[in-house]
């Protein structure tokens, strides 16, 4: 049974909520700005900051980051890269190894935005040769980084005696420009910061060894893009590492639990409404699998800020059934009442919505002033 500690707070309450449809995604602009400022502060400035935009996918949020002085970005898809370029970003790293037909889409993107730096990842000689041959056939060049596997076991070349040889091989290919390394350690998520720090640093030892080998061979150290949000606090202590947090811009219940040292504010919520009271002690809301990320167990989907003593029992595509243990509270709840929830995982939750209601704060309270497109949730924009 969940009792929400923030149930007495009303920062999230929207004055014109009766005009909003549900379920819907809410983005609180002032909190987004605050989180961006904290992210920059914890990175000791913007010079080594490459935030990942897979969480927000929203031009309005990217505009805020650009206005704050952030000039480099990371993303996961061609559509996200295009959205960044459309919004004004000039430096974009696509953190994927692109294979046909995405290679052709990358070339089209580079041709459509010739003043934007686009880089992608490679992790093997065969794909690197294929990538180089494709760009050679089109009399073009491609910027790349070597993706290394330092424990995530999801992508990247294994670190070992042959890694330097692969790096040299890719660097020698005529139509590739190799800029350095990409090392993602998002699997390391201990709640205890010192334990997490120790594990991250231990896992990064072989990356540092490779960097020394590259430096000895090339004469200059390679660029190293390291980690995501869980490792942000650790990698930020190393000036030579570029860091790419993403979730902290909107934040979520999951990371708030396991990353207590990162004190960001909830800036993205889901609005839902009670649509039935089918049985004593039960309510049903219009928030099913299509409204909040459902990849985690039922008890780790959403935390309501204005509801106490409840348990999310089950979800279907358009409904959630919730047990209310306090009978007096159940009696007070009415069909049509609005509930505000913090997703356990905000990134795939945002991806469920075409647009977000944009919430601005004033002395009179929080008000929705319009909508903002979650443009990069699409697999394709124009390219």
Image (tube, rainbow, N blue to C red):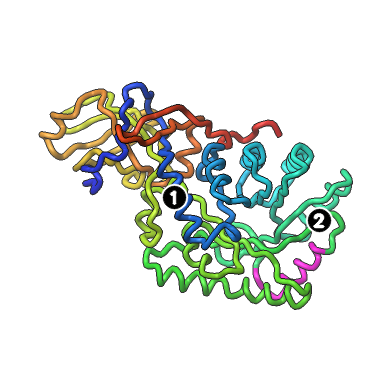
Report the side of 14 relative to 137 (left or right): left
**Mark nearer the viewer, 1 or 2:** 1
Tell me if residue 101 can be seen: no
- The residue under the point 71% across, 52% down is 119
* Vertical comparison of 295 with 262: above or below: above
- The residue under the point 35% across, 35% down is 362
Give the camera-side residue of 115 and 161.
115
- The residue under the point 85% across, 47% down is 140
Please give the label number shown on residue 176: 2
Label 1 CA crowd tier, 10 Å (few <14, some 14–19, many 20+):
many
Q: Is residue 229 magenta?
A: no
Tell me the element at label 2.
strand
* Vertical comparison of 218 with 313: above or below: below
Tell me which numbered mark, 1 or 2, is placed earlier along the sequence. 1
The quarter of the picture where residue 333 lies is top left
- The residue under the point 25% across, 38% down is 306
User: Which secondary structure dominates the residues rendered in magenta?
Assistant: helix
Please give the label number shown on residue 336: none
Report the side of 33 relative to 304 (left or right): right
Q: Are marks 1 and 2 in contact (CB under 8 Å)?
A: no
Q: Position of residue 240 (x, y in %)?
A: 61, 69
* Vertical comparison of 358 with 219: above or below: above
Q: Which residue is mark 1?
A: 35
Q: Which residues are magenta?
A: 159-171
Q: Position of residue 61 (x, y in %)?
A: 52, 41
């Amino acid at each position: 049974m969940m009792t929400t500690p923030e149930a007495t707070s009303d920062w999230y309450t929207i004055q014109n909520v009766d005009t909003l449809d549900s379920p819907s995604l809410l983005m609180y602009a002032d909190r987004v700005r605050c989180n961006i400022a904290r992210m920059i502060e914890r990175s000791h400035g913007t010079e080594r900051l490459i935030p990942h935009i897979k969480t927000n996918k929203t031009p309005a949020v990217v505009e805020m980051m650009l206005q704050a002085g952030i000039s480099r970005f990371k993303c996961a898809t061609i559509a996200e890269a295009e959205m960044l370029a459309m919004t004004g970003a000039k430096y974009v790293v696509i953190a994927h190894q692109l294979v046909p037909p995405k290679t052709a889409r990358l070339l089209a993107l580079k041709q459509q935005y010739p003043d934007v730096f686009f880089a992608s990842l490679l992790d093997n000689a065969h794909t690197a040769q294929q990538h180089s041959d494709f760009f050679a056939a089109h009399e073009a060049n491609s910027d790349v980084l070597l993706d290394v596997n330092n424990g995530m076991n999801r992508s990247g070349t294994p670190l070992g005696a042959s890694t330097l040889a692969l790096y040299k091989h890719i660097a020698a290919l005529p139509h590739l420009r190799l800029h350095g390394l990409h090392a993602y350690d998002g699997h390391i998520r201990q709640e205890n910061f010192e334990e997490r720090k120790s594990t991250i640093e231990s896992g990064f030892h072989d990356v540092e060894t490779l960097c020394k080998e590259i430096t000895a061979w090339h004469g200059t150290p390679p660029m190293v893009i390291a980690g995501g949000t869980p490792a942000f606090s650790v990698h930020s202590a190393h000036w030579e590492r570029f860091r790419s947090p993403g979730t902290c811009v909107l934040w979520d219940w999951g990371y708030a639990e396991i990353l207590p040292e990162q004190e960001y504010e909830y800036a993205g919520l889901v609005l839902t409404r009670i649509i039935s009271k089918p049985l004593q002690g039960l309510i049903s809301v219009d928030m099913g699998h299509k409204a909040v990320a459902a990849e985690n167990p039922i008890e780790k989907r959403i935390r309501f800020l204005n509801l106490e003593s409840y348990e999310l029992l089950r979800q279907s595509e358009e409904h959630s059934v919730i047990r209310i243990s306090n009978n007096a509270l159940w009696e007070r709840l009415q069909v049509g009442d609005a509930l505000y929830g913090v997703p356990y995982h905000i990134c795939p939750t945002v991806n469920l919505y075409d647009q977000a209601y944009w919430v601005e704060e004033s002395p009179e309270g929080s008000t929705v002033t319009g909508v903002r497109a979650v443009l990069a949730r699409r697999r394709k924009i124009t390219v």
